[in-house]
Structures are given as C-alpha cells and as structure tokens.
Amino acid sequence: MATHSECHQANPEMKPAAPTLSGAQIFLSCLVAEGVDTLFGMPGGVILSIYEALPEFPLNHILVRHEQGAIHMAEGYARATGKAGVAIATSGPGATNLVTGLADAYYDSVPVVAFTGNVPSGLLGNDAFQEADIVGITRPVTKHNIIVRRAEDLAQAIKEAFHVATSGRPGPVLVDIPKDVLLATAEFDYEAARIDLPGYTVEQSFTEQDLDSMLALLKEAKQPVLLAGGGVISAGAHLEVQAFAERFNLPVANSLMGLGGFPTSHPNFLGFCGMHGQYWANIAIANADLLLIVGNRLGERQTGKTDRFARNAKIVHIDLDPTTLQKNVAALLPVQGDIQAIFQQLLSKTEDMTDFASSLESRVQWFDAIQGWKARRPDPQAVEGLLTPQYVLDRIFHYLPKDAFVTTEVGQHQMWAAQRFNLDRPRSFISSGGLGTMGFGFPAAIGVQAAFPDKTVIDIAGDGSFQMTLQELATARDHGLAVKVAIINNGYLGMVRQWQDKTWNRPSQSRMTSPDYVKLAEAYGCVGFVVERPEEVDAVIQQAYAITDRPVLIDFRVREKADVYPWVPAGGANEDMLIEE
C-alpha cells in the first residue's frame, strides 16, 4: 500500500493541504490576498485576537483616535487610489462610530470595506456589554452587509465584500464578525472561496441604437454641454470622455464629485455647476440645446429646481447605475452601461467626423457666448486691508504642486475651494458631496497621505468642521504623515450664518470660538502658523508646503462675514442664482 508521501511524489501537482488557521488569522490572510496594504482602526475587546495576530502580516495599521476617523481615512485612501479602503472597529460604540462614514461613502459611491467585531454568537440579542446590531443599523447606508456565523464562511464573506464594494457602482460594505468566530479555527483556502451572490449583477443594457441616437442628437446640436460627474472617475473613463469632448469640441462642466475628471486647464472646461457653481457653467447649461450627462446622480444641489434644469435642452443621461436614470431629471435618451465601454465605442464610431462638420462650425459662436458670461465679474479679493477667504484660496492653489491632493471639509470653504480647484488629475479633489459631512476632510487627508506619503496633501477646512475631528492630529503625527490643514477661520459656522442672515430673521448659535491653533499644533507635536494680513499669506503657504516630516496647521483669520456666491437659494432655479455685485 502506497504511503502518503509516495502518493504525493507520484502526483507532484497535487495541491498542498489547506492550512488550519484561527478566524483572526483567516481575516488578515484574506486582506493580504485582496492586495490590502493599509488599514485604519482601533483595537477593542472582541477583536483583540486580530491585533494579537497582526504583527505576523505585511499590513500597515494606522491607529486612529476615534473610529469615525478610521472610516473617513479609509474613504480618503479609496478616493485617492481607486482601491477599497479598509477600516476596523470593535463592537458596540466602536461599530456605531463608523455609521456616519459609511453613509458618506454610500452617497458618494466610495468603495470601503468596514470590519466590526461583535459579542460572542451565544450572546447576540441578549443586550450583552458593547453589543449593537450593526448589520441592522447600517443596512440603509451600505451596499451590502453581513454577519459571519462560522469561521469556515469567513473567507467567502470577505471575498464577496471586496467584490461588491469595488464592482458596478462602488460603495461601502460591512462585515460583522462575532468574537467566537475569530477564535475558532478552520481550513483556509482563499482561491477556493467562491463568490455566491444570487441577484447581484452589474448590468450592461446599452445598444448600438442608443449610441447612434446619441450621435444623431449631437449632429443636430448647436449649443451642447457635457456634464461629467464622479462616475467618470470611478469608471476610469476620464481619458475617453476627454477625447470625446475634444473630438466634438464640447464645453465640459463637472459636478462637485466630478472635479478632477476633466482637466481644469483645458480650454473647454467650464468649472463646476450647481448651487454654488460657476455662474457661466450654470448659464451655459440653462442655454444648452443638448446636455450629455455622464456618471452623475443629479442631486438637487446640482440641478436646482428640476423642472427648470436645462429646460431648453434635449437630455442624454449615461450611467452605470440604472436606478439613477430617470430618477431626478427626465432624459430623452437614458443610456445604461459601463461608461468607459460606452465612450470607447463612441470614439470608434466617430473616427470619420465628416458628417459632423456643420455642427462643429456652430461651436465658435457658442464658446463666444460662454466667454461673455465668464467675463461678467471678478471674484472679491482683499477688502479694506482685511483678509478674504477667496484671496487665501487663490494663493493656496497658486502654489499648490500639480501632483498634489486636495481634501475639504464641508461649508463655505468647500465651495470656495471647488470654485478655485486647478489640478488636472482624477482623484485629486476629495470632498464629501452627498451627505455633506463636517469633519470629513482632515481624516480623509490622512488616508490620502498614507497612500501617497511623498505627495503634498492639503485639507481646506473651516474652523467649525476641523474641530469635529482634530484629535486625529495625533494619528498623523505618530505616523509621520505631513498633512497640511488650511483653516479658513471666520469665527462662525459660516454657511449656517450665511443662510441665517439671508433667509431667516436672525443668526442663532452659529457664532463659535476656536482654540489657539498654533498652541494646539505644538501640543500635538505639529507645526502651527497664524495669518492675519494679506501680505503674510504667500510666505506662510510656501513654508507650510516645504515641511515634509509632520502635520502643519495654518490659521487664516479671514473676514468674518464673507458669503459664497454665486448662490442658488433652496428651491430656486440655477439660472436665477444670486450674484455678488
């Protein structure tokens, strides 16, 4: 009778027996198999087995000071790299601290995978210490979530989580793992783990007729506009969309989430549109006879009053997510499918542009009209010796390296930054769009810096937003992540104050104080500057950009009551935007 070793020698291709690992080891092995290099988290009771095994694996763990910081860092990492960001938290409050970031990622289609521990399976539902039904809590704000009941199922659950997060329209996934599952053992074979998700498909329904119909509309158009959203970036279709816009000489506007998806230095670039978008971008869309909308969910902050949005235009709406089509704005031609594949086929169909010559001739007059709107007004600069936020942002972007990354918090400073954004690369502008999460920008910047430690990363912050997650200064300092934070400090919750002043009877609870940010920076082992006069701005910005070994805070003491314009009051039409004269 042949021995085991003789059988193995007789069949040298026989697969080795799968190793038996603990659930914690399986978890970490799966991350390595998925190509994860960095994870953001904080240890806690039910996940200590993971942290016990962590030093054995080639993973860079960023220890945060609050789990909300972990999920926003994972978002920043994902937005900058295109890979799934990973966050880990313990049960109960650790898990619930992730919820805001998961909701943020859900609205902005960001691929993050969050892992939470939970109490032992036998205690689930018994109101155990630090127990929370995190699967139930996060179901409305995740693309997929699951609680894993057996160590044998862990590899499959994790493989499915990364697949769902990164395929189709990206989004957040949560995997909840009870303590006993992490302690149990099972055979580990990641290659054998299969994806079994009945009903989950990435649809492709566009047809040749759809593409031909779109080209026929373009042939007739005299005043077309292409409106590109974040879906262009997620699809990796920015080069194809740019080539198509150049071939047809189309003016291109971006949504807030689409910034970076079309080069800002390109002569066809209009800027971003919507409630605080560029005046000329909004007016061009209002006067367009054809609007090509690509990778864009058309939220109300972008469209304004929907029955007057692009009311003179025939609308073509292209998106991978079928639920986005015909949802907020009716399209004459909805086209569902992979954006990159659609534009590759459109480019292939239009190598000969002879049939479009007449349409292209009309672009000269169209661009002349747009230039007239664009020249309507300059932005306010320094006023009466006071430091204006607009001037500060102009100078920040003037000195910003072209390979840098910009994150923002949420508020007035976010809109001023979007108006002045001047980089030409996708994934270089990272902001909270759909949920509008104050406190997002700084931890997101840490996530970006962790992915690109040698690049300049700057968070454009308000004094209100920054104070929500400033404790992550310790995280950045400990890991040598030289994030720059430009605090546009006006002593108010600025956007709230603007709305109260203009649309309500009185300001209420929007005035706020700040700490001494220079002392705060020094307390955390960082570098701090304060700027109070316009003539100080340039030198401090250049000094800050030159510091590469620790975080830098700049406290810009700006004019207190500057307002963001253009401004479309809630419920108004974009073409009726208010302009600061």
Image (tube, grey):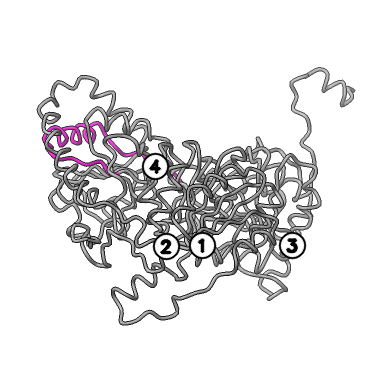
Query: Is residue 141 at all visible to an observer of this figure?
Result: no
Q: Please name which of the two marks, 4 or 1, marks the residue nearer to the observer.
A: 4
Q: Residue 216 magenta-drawn?
A: yes
Circles 2, 3 touching at the beta carbon (< 8 Å)? no
Q: How crowded is mark 4: few (under 14 residues within 10 Å), some or many (20 or more)?
A: many
Q: In this view, does 482 lie above or below 385?
A: above
Nearer to us of marks 2 and 1 is 2
Residue 104 in the image: state x and y as whole percent. Answer: 48, 58
User: Which residue, given by chain and number where applicable, does mark 2 sit on?
Assistant: 411
Q: Tell me the SS state at disc 4.
A: loop
Which residue does the image show at 24% across and 27% down from the upper left?
247
Q: Mark 3 points at which residue?
A: 44
Residue range corresponding to the magenta coloring:
200-227
The image quadrant where one finds the N terminus is top right
Give the alpha-carbon distance from disc 4 to disc 3, as whole Å: 42 Å
Q: Mark 4 points at which residue?
A: 422
Identify the element where label 3 is drawn: loop
Residue where numbered disc 1 is placed: 139
Residue 363 in percent (x, y) is at 15, 34
What distance separates the C-alpha of mark 4 from that of mark 2? 19 Å
**Taking 358 as reference, is 502 left or right?**
right
Mark 3: few/some/many CA within 10 Å (<14, 14-19, 20+): some
